Image (spheres, rainbow, N blue to C red):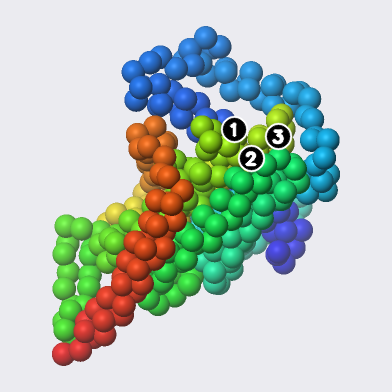
Amino acid sequence: MGRDSFEITVNIVKMFAIFLLMVQAVPILVWLERRGSAFIQNRTGPNRVGPLGLIQLLADAVKFLFKQPFMPERGVAPLYYFAPIAALIPGALALNAIPLSTPIKIEPFEMLGQMWGPYTFLFQGYDIGIGIVFILGISSLGVYSILLAGWGSSNKYSLMGAVRGAAQGISYELALSLALVGILMVYGTLSFKEIVDAQAGPLTFMAFGKEYVIGALPNWGIFYQPLGALIFFAATFAEANRLPFDLPEAEGELVAGFHTEYAGFSLLLFYIGEYGHMMVASALLATFYFGGYSIPFVSPEAVNAFWLAKVDGANTAAILTAVTHHLSLLVRVALFLWIFIHVRWTLPRFRYDQLMSLGWKTMLPWALANVVVTAIWLWLGHRT
């Protein structure tokens, strides 16, 4: 956690700040989804409570916080009440493990009559060397919240949605994991920072023992693994229970699916968990395939030199450098989140047999083929 009280305090605050970043982003995404869906369907959308309906978010918060919850008469109380918490935890833990910007290097400084530092603060909650393994493992626990909600509600629609969600999650996690195997083979590491660093500079690849450089393109993973990126992004829709894969909560068939019996703050936790999975998926997609927090053709040292010329103090420049790269990542994440929203209001819902067929008969074989082709390509690339 740190060498002294200051470093420990900052690291603890970081974890809470990233969690609050996820929570506070949910109302914005809800407003954006309402407004965006309205434009897509040629209607106005929220426009009565505040300018452009912005204060509607406050009205929703009041409703969620003060609406009286009712537990089903035959429900299983421990499972029923724990399910929303279990839905929130995986997204929060996973987002904390993703680097959101460059590390902040703080030079020694004086405070409260003593010297502190130097420090290197990571722009993430915690750094795990095998971060992607941790995220895949912790994200897979999200299916337990669906099962707990379905069984704890003692409602046939909830239980059917929970069974659908469990089967769907298992099916698409295989394709999602295999899609990432290809990009991990390309970079040869499980460390997020090393993967982001490897995507710096122009596009460079090996073929038959020779190195080729395409200066007009950034060295992003999407150019090495286009099929893997497509499979990964499609599988994340199923993992987050978003249309066209929202069969666990299909309104036309199951009322509201696994959270039919939930209302108020408990229902809000499910929504935060869903949007949290969307943010994690978008951040992973940006990190693996679109350079992460890096700025194309601009090194962190160049950004730091720019801020050193604008402000006084190396520490201030280091913080502004990290903020600049963080904004670079947020632009990519915001774009992918908008695609999540746009797809929801564009594509129709799959039938359940179509959903399972796509996962097992199409995406899984293509993900396996992508791994095999990547291995052959890497082998041929280093042969003369």
Quarter holding the C terminus is bottom left
Q: Amino acid at mark 1?
A: Val
> Pointers 2 and 1 in contact (CB under 8 A)?
yes
Q: Label for residue 157? A: 2
- Nearest the viewer among 90 and 161 is 161
**Residue 292 location, quadrant:** bottom left
| Residue 7 rendering spot, x and y as whole percentages | 69, 59
| Residue 180 rendering spot, x and y as whole percentages | 41, 66
Q: Which is closer to the viewer, label 3 or label 2? A: 2
The answer to whether residue 149 shows anywhere in this view is yes
> Pointers 1 and 3 in contact (CB under 8 A)?
no
- Nearest the viewer among 76 and 120 is 76
Q: Residue at x 52, y 9 (%)?
A: 48
Quarter holding the N terminus is bottom right
| Residue 96 rendering spot, x and y as whole percentages | 60, 55
Q: Secondary structure at mark 1?
A: loop
Q: Secondary structure at mark 2?
A: helix
- Nearest the viewer among 145 and 258 is 258
Provide the residue designation for mark 3: 262
Provide the residue designation for mark 1: 255
Q: Secondary structure at mark 3?
A: loop
Q: CA distance from mark 3 to mark 2?
A: 13 Å
Q: Earlier in the sequence, mark 3 or mark 2?
A: 2
Q: Earlier in the sequence, mark 1 or mark 3?
A: 1
Q: Residue at x 25, y 59 (%)?
A: 218
Does residue 383 sit above or below 71 in this rendering?
below
Few, some or many residues within 10 Å of mark 3 (<14, 14–19, 20+):
many
Q: Which is closer to the viewer, label 1 or label 3? A: 1
Q: Earlier in the sequence, mark 2 or mark 1?
A: 2
Few, some or many residues within 10 Å of mark 1 (<14, 14–19, 20+):
some
Q: Amino acid at mark 3?
A: Tyr
